[in-house]
Amino acid sequence: MDRRTTPANGRVAATELEGVVAAAAYVAGAASFVVVSVADLLKAPDGPRDRQLLCGAKVRVLEDREGWSFVQASDGYVGYVASGALDAKAAEPTHRVIARATNAYERPDFKSPDRLSLPFGAAVAVNRIEGRYAETPLGYIPLVHLGPVADRLCDPVEVARLHLGTPYLWGGNSTFGLDCSGLVQASLLACGIPCPGDSDMQSTEVGQPIAEDEPLQRGDLIFWKGHVAMMTTPDRMIHANATHMAVVEEDFAEACARIAAKGDGAIIARRRP
């Protein structure tokens, strides 16, 4: 079983895994919400980052122990989050950030002190509208930067382009920093297309495979071992990569040649969401 998507750590396991994996206890888990801008989802307490969760993300808490919560995210990914980054009593989000990023202010005034920044995709509970601002538990957020959580964008390529210039961050999932699979996941989820967190999962689970003799088109996903990119046109692609240390859009053939020259191999999969 894949450690990344198996809600079990030896001490506890999700109730649906009883009889499947060994654990000292089997628990249903409890719902909670991320209440910081971005929370790292770690492989182990104080361990390396696997992925990230954005503000407003709903998680299933299976264990809270010594300041760390063992959780399962909505995409099925499991890991450890600092317990202080979660709040089971937080209000269910009503709106999502649709701008590249936004700020929450102390008052409905852009000259008032800002409390925190929120990346694209973060979700908040709007209590009421005051002028051009939405009052939330985090502060006042410009209305123009928010959209209802039920709404979906329609073009993953345009969502990906919103992230152009974002710095590369291994395991990152936000416009503050992301990696190749984080960019793809953010772009597809914003458009209501299910997408797992890592490129190896995406290469088998997202959409349908594309025949070798079929031309590539806008929105197609291209996979190398450990890397993924999205086509923006039949001959250009966008990806977060460690060569540029940022999200860039570039010529597809040139990128393929560079990737091959670095020893990272040939394309291993092509999929259409």
Image (cartoon, rainbow, N blue to C red):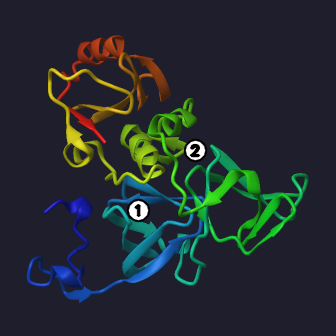
Q: Residue furthest left?
A: 19
Q: Which residue is mark 2?
A: 176
Q: Amino acid at mark 1?
A: Asp
Q: Residue at x 30, y 47 (%)?
A: 198
> The N terminus lies in which quarter of the figure?
bottom left
The residue tagged with tag 1: helix, strand or loop?
A: loop
Which quadrant would residue 181 be assigned to in this image?
top left
The residue tagged with tag 2: helix, strand or loop?
A: loop
Res 44 visible: no
Which quadrant would residue 74 be assigned to in this image?
bottom left
Q: Does the residue at mark 2 contact the one at mark 1 (Cβ under 8 Å)?
A: no
**Percent x, y for residue 97?**
62, 54
**Percent x, y for residue 200?**
23, 43
Q: Residues within 10 Å of mark 1 (few under 14, many from 20)?
A: few
> The C terminus lies in which quarter of the figure?
top left
Q: Residue at x 25, y 60 (%)?
A: 4
Against 96, is 14 above or below?
A: below
Against 257, is 17 above or below?
A: below
| Total numbered circles | 2
Against 80, is 144 above or below?
A: above
Viewer-proximal residue, 136 or 155?
155
Viewer-proximal residue, 269 or 62?
269
Side of 143 where 91 appears, left or right: left
Q: Which residue is mark 1?
A: 46
Q: Amino acid at mark 2?
A: Phe
